[in-house]
Image (cartoon, helix red, strand yellow):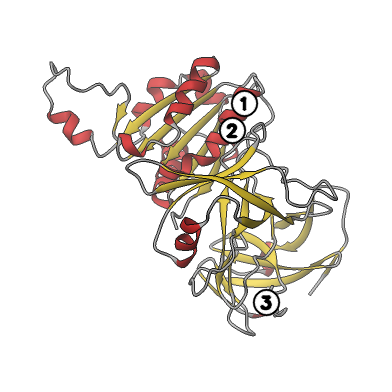
Amino acid sequence: MKMIVLSEDDFVKVSDSNDIQPSHMKEIKLENESICIVNIEGKYYAIGNICTHEGGPLADGTLAGYEVECPWHGSKFDVRTGEVKNPPASEPELVYQVKVDGTNILIKKQGQSKSSQIELTLIEKDKVNDTDVMSFKFSKQLNDQIDNKTLNYNTGQFAFFDIGDVYNDPKGPIRHFTISSSPTENFIMFSTRMRDSPYKKRLSTLEKGAKVKVRGPEGNFVLHKDYSKPAVFLSGGIGVTPFRSMIKYATDMQLPVKIIMFDSNKDRNNILFKKEFDDWTSINKNLKIIYTISEEDSQHKEQSPLSTSNDWKGEYGRIDKTMILKYVDNSLLNNSIFYICGPPNMLKAMQILLQEDLEIPKERIKVEEFTGY
């Protein structure tokens, strides 16, 4: 175990990549923090090393996929998000941003930016018609205003929501959700697909006025600051939530950034936030949204070319090279920052499309995975 001396940079070297073999972990000390560095197929993650249950050393535990198991009582955590995957732990772990420079593994210092927990009040919940998606809105007016705390976040970030009274959920009693509202709005919102898990069942029963504990924000899937570079969003299903936050913020703040979003869904009913997006497109000259639906593709191909019964104005099929080049010219292609958010299969397919078919360098691609739980 090595003691690390901090530099003045945002990132600090914590280890050499040769010291941590694939599927292995290592504990390091960063100032007064104990951190577990994990190597999964050559990609490195950093998570708090002290189990939030009773303080077991996670680096001494076992690693299976993206989950580390505490050697003391069997609590499991997702090394990508810090989320509890198996009790008895109920509180998530801190996670740290990691980058690799040559053989140097560096992590971003937390400093004074550690996540704090606040309590928010549910003010509204809405079910999207003909889908299994619900949106939950919380008041920005906190219950305790003594120290004037609030949930400050950047567009695209996520937070952990502890709704209480969740028992026997194999993934633990806390979930993280992308904040789909913009910092310019007077509420905090997340949208999620409802499932039969104990957490989701409990979530569906929350009534107006319910209090939830929120820790965050976290995440680096945020809109870039160099507005001379256009943004191209590739969205799949519920993965559109961070893009709602980014688009609303860019529209409200009148940011001089060109945004093109390809929004892929299985059918028209599953297009989330469409009315809002269409309204914002009408007032934001820098915004263009291309909707595409996949399950109606075969039906569309069977229709007569002379048919006028189909009022759909969007695209059909999955996002591919031809579709992107129809709306993104060479100038945009060579200067844009590309954002991908959706289920794992879609994310992988879009990365291959961008890197191999369109030859977009990795440094201009940002990804965020939605597991759909």
Q: Position of residue 141 (x, y in %)?
A: 71, 43
The residue sitting at 19% across, 29% down in the picture is 300
Relative to 64, say whether 108 is above or below: above
Q: Earlier in the sequence, mark 2 or mark 3?
A: 3
Under mark 3, the amino acid is: His
**Front residue (pair 46, 335):** 46
Measure the C-alpha gap from mark 2 to mark 3: 35 Å
The residue sitting at 38% across, 36% down in the picture is 271
Left or right of 330 on screen, residue 176: right
**Front residue (pair 69, 38):** 69
Quarter of the figure with residue 55? bottom right
Measure the C-alpha gap from mark 1 to mark 2: 6 Å
Measure the C-alpha gap from mark 3 to mark 1: 41 Å
Q: Residue furthest bottom?
A: 72
Which residue is tagged 2? 246
The numbered disc on residue 145 is none
The residue sitting at 40% across, 26% down in the picture is 290
User: Counting other residues with Cα less than 10 Å from the Cα at mark 1, is it few (<14), some (14-19), or many (20 or more)?
Assistant: many
**Front residue (pair 65, 181):** 181
**Front residue (pair 193, 102):** 193
Which residue is tagged 3? 53
Q: Position of residue 147 (x, y in %)?
A: 85, 50
Under mark 2, the amino acid is: Met
Disc 2 is placed on an element classified as: helix
Which residue is tagged 1? 250
Under mark 1, the amino acid is: Ala
**Is residue 99 at least partly visible in the picture?**
no
Q: Position of residue 197 (x, y in %)?
A: 43, 65
Disc 3 is placed on an element classified as: loop
Asked if disc 1 and disc 2 are in contact, CB closer than 8 Å, the reply is yes
